[in-house]
Image: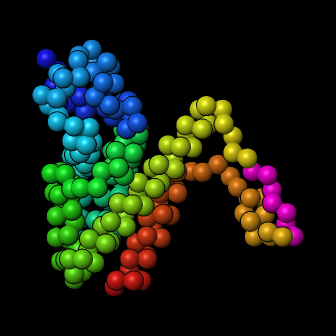
Amino acid sequence: MISKKEIIECALTLGLSKASMNGLGKALGVTAPALYRHMKSKNELIVECCDYIMGKVELPKQSDWESYLYDFGENFRQVLLATPGSVEFIRYNQQFTPNSKILVDNALGVLMNAKFDVQTGFMAFSSIFTRVTDIVQHQEQSQYLLSNGVKPDLQLPDAETLPNLALLFGEVKPVNYDNYFKDGMKITLEGIKAVYC
């Protein structure tokens, strides 16, 4: 007998594009109808995968909204990185799951305590959520390309017609994703302060 957890973990391992009921059944050594006892559809499978991922994100302990959002971002990033390809599922799913509701409710409590109204608090939380998924997706794509021997084509643009881009390309270094994350979070938090505080 196959468990729901085994189905979810297999789907996350296969990736969103390959996580069909037939593909899962084949990978797990069962028939697709056996999976339908646990999931009614691929959409339900995606929601369950997202809930599983979000259930691993630890709630921050801080009461200061900036520290809270930063720690949420760090916790969320670590969970996504520990489950390669999970960003695909998170971005595909457009609905709250039981575990994401808990995270959002907790964040809104901290933000409203800091005098954000509920809509603005949700926008602030969403900004961090989106920034983290962007960074993790960029990191995973970069690692995938490098592991498959694909190097970015960084032909320097003509400095006379595109001087600023030429300057940027001339200074390109390998990305340190820990620093990229810290800088991205700082920019996002400063933007939230500038717009909403």
Q: Position of residue 151 (x, y in %)?
A: 69, 40
Q: In this orientation, does residue 64 appear?
A: no
Residue at image position (30%, 51%) is 93
Q: Is residue 190 above or below residue 184?
A: below
Closest to the observer, 190 or 163: 163
Q: Quadrant of residue 145?
A: top right
Span of residues in magenta: 154-160
Closest to the observer, 176 or 25: 25
Residue at image position (34%, 83%) is 196
Magenta highlight: main SS: loop
Residue at image position (39%, 47%) is 87
Location of the N terminus by quadrant is: top left
Q: Is residue 193 above or below residue 173?
A: below
Q: In this orientation, does residue 194 appear?
A: yes
Q: Is residue 16 above or below residue 100?
A: above
Q: Position of residue 140 (x, y in %)?
A: 50, 43
Task: Give the total of numbered labels.
Answer: 0
**Residue 139 left/right relative to 79:** right
Within the magenta stretch, is there residue 42? Answer: no
Q: Position of residue 105 (x, y in %)?
A: 16, 64
Q: Position of residue 21 (x, y in %)?
A: 28, 28
Within the magenta stretch, is there residue 158? Answer: yes
Residue at image position (21%, 41%) is 44
